[in-house]
Image (spheres, grey):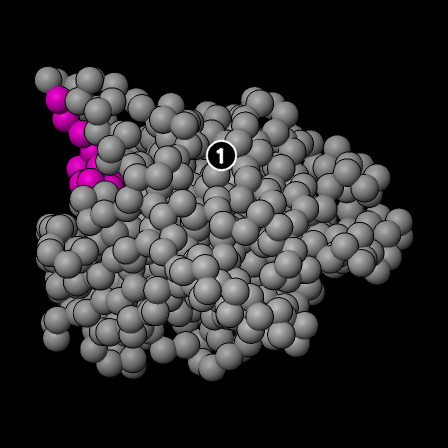
Amino acid sequence: MRHRIAAALIVCTLAIVLACTSSTDDAASPNTSTNQSRTPTPVTAVALDLDEPLTGVTGIEDRSALSPKYGDVLVLANRSDPPSGFDTMRTSSIALHHVAGALFGPGNLVMRCRGNLYLACPYLATSWVADPGFTEWTFTLRDDAIWHDGTPFTPKDVVFWFDLALNGYHLDGKVRAPAYFKGDLGDIRSVEALSDNRVRITLGARNKFFLDVLANPRLKFAHPKHLMEPRLLAGDMSVSPLDIGLVGLGPFVFEDYQRGTQVQVRRFDDYFEVDDVGNPLPYLDGIDYIIVKEPAAMDAAFRSGRLDGGARGFGHYLTTERKQGYIDDLGDDVYYAEIEGGMFRLAFNMLKEGPWQDPRVRRAIALWVDRDASIPVALGGFGWTTPSLGPPNPFKDKAFVVWPTFDTEPLAERRVEAKRLMAEVGYADGFSMGHLCRARQTPGCELLQAQLKELGVDLRIQVIDEGEWNRARVSLDFDSQQGRLSVLPIPEGTEGVYGVYSRSPDSYAKHEDPQVSEFYRLLREATLPERRLDIWRRLQEYIFVEQTYVVTIAEAIYVAPYRSYVKGLVIPPEDGHSNTDFATVWIDQNEK
C-alpha cells in the first residue's frame, strides 16, 4: 500500500464518516437517472483542482465498518465474450465496454459526469487549461493513480496512448493500425509530457468542445506503456490488453476469464475515487460477468435469481414482450434502466460502384422506407421516429435533434416521389444491392429487405456473427450496412461516424466527401451557439437529404433489467456505453 495518512487521522476520519453515513443519500436512485441538474454548459477552459482523495481507509480489511454499502459481488449478464483481446482501440462493442468500464475506468483524462452526462468531469486529470484559441490544452494529472500492477500512472502513459491511437506502431516493416476512433479525436498535432505531472495536447484547429469529445467512454487507457511498449519493440504488433494481463486503472482488477463462461473482476484497493463523504470507491467486492449469448437464456437466468442485472447491448436489451414477462413473474422486484440508444439506419458505401452512386437512388430509398413500421420489428417496440424529438431529457437541447424534421410528408406522398426518382434515373425495374447484416439485427435487415422489394430493390442480406462484424463494418467490401448503433451526444463528436473514411473507417457511410470535413471544421471553429447550431443543421441536411449518404429511420430506447436491491446505479439518459465502471453501485442486503 502506498497510502500516507497517519493512523490518528484514520481514527478521526472513521468517527466522522460513521457519524455521517446513515444520513448520506445513495449515489443514484435505483430507478431514475442521476442526471437531474442544470442545462449543460461545456467545460472548456479551467477545471478546479481536486483535493487529494482520502484513501488511507482502503487498508481496512472490513469496509462494512465504514458503511453498509460495502461488500458482495454483483452478477451481470454479458452478451458475448469481449472481442479483440479486450482491446478498446479495436472495437466499440458493448460486449467489451460493459466489462471495460470496471477494468479501465469510466473515462481517460476526463469522463462524462455521473450527475450530468453532457458535462466533462475530471478523471485521470485533476485540472486543465485551454489557451484563448482552444488549440492548446494542458492537463495536470492525478498523483495517486496507479496501474493495477502497482506502477504509477505518468504523463508518459498519456503520450504513449495518444501516439498509439493516432499513429499506430511501425517497426521493421511491421505495422499496427491506429485506433478505429482516430477520426473522433480530430486534428491532434502533438502530445507532450511536461514537468509537474502535466500533459499538453496541441490541436491543428480550434476545438472548444475537445473535452466533450475526449469524454467519450469508449476512449479508455487500456494500454500501459511499461507493458505494451516492450511487446511492440519485440515485433508483436497484435498485442492486446488481454495479452498483458488486463492491467488497467479502473475500480476493479482482473481476476479471471473463462472464454464462453465468465469474466471476473475484484475491487482494486488502491483505486483513487471516493464518494461524497470520503469513503473509498468501489463499494462492491467484485463483479462477475456471466457470458450469456442468447437473450432468452439471459431472461431465464434473471428470472430464476441467478443474475442481478441484464446485459447491455442490442439484442439483449428487452423488447416489450420480454419486459412484460419480467413484470408478470417478478413485479416490483425489478426496475428497468431506460437509455436512449442508437439509430436504426441504412448507410451506403460510396467508395464502391453501383446504382446507389446516384443521389436520386439514395433519396428514393430514404423516401420509401416506412419508419413507423421499424419500431416493433427492428427495435423491439421501444423507440421513436419522426416527427417526435425523442423522450423527455432536461439536459439535452432538442434544437440539436435535427433529423426528425426531414421528410415529414405522409408515407404515400413520399413513395410516389420515390417511384418517380427511380424512373427518372433509369431504375424503374429496380436493381440489386448487397447489405452487411449483423446477426443481432437480422429482423431489421429483413424488414428493410421486404420494404425495398416493393420499390424494386433486391436487398441481398449477408448475415455475419459478432466477431466478423467488428472487422467487416470498417471494410469496403459491402454495398450498404447499418453501422454501429450509438452516436456521441455532441455534434463535434460525430465525425467518427459521419466523416470521411480515410480518417474514420468506422463511419456509417463510406465516403471521401471534403464538404463533410469542411462542415466539421466550421463546427470546431464556431464561437457562437447560434452559429454552431446552424452548421450542425446544414451538416445533417447535407448528409441525410442533399446527398443521402445515410437513411435515418428510427431511434431505439434500450431497456435493461436490474434487481431492486441493486442501488447506486448511474443510468445514463443516452449511450449505454456510459457509466459502466459501476464504482458507485452497492447491494442492499436488507432487500436481497
* Magenta residue span: 160-171
Q: Which is nearer the eye, 40 or 539?
A: 40
Query: Residue shown at 25%/52% (left/top)?
Result: 185
- Based on the picture, tell me whether residue 559 belongs to the magenta stretch: no
Q: Which is nearer the eye, 163 or 48?
A: 48
Q: Which is nearer the eye, 340 or 174?
A: 174
Q: Main secondary structure of the magenta part?
A: helix
**Residue annotated with mark 1:** 254
Tell me residue 17's x, y (percent).
57, 70
Residue 5 visible to the viewer:
yes
Q: Which is nearer the eye, 142 or 406?
A: 142
Tell me residue 19's x, y (percent).
62, 74
Query: Residue shown at 36%/48% (left/top)?
Result: 2
How busy is the neighbourhood of tag 1: few (under 14 within 10 Å), some, or many (20 plus)?
A: many
Kind of residue at badge 1: Phe
* Element at label 1: strand
Which quarter of the figure has residue 243?
top left
Query: Residue shown at 84%/48% (left/top)?
Result: 325
In the rendered image, the vertical position of residue 360 relative to residue 475, given as above or below: below
Which quarter of the figure has residue 111?
bottom left
In the rendered image, the vertical position of residue 299 relative to residue 260, given as above or below: below
* Residue that lies at the very extreme toward the front in this rendered image: 8
Q: Quadrant of the N terminus?
A: top left
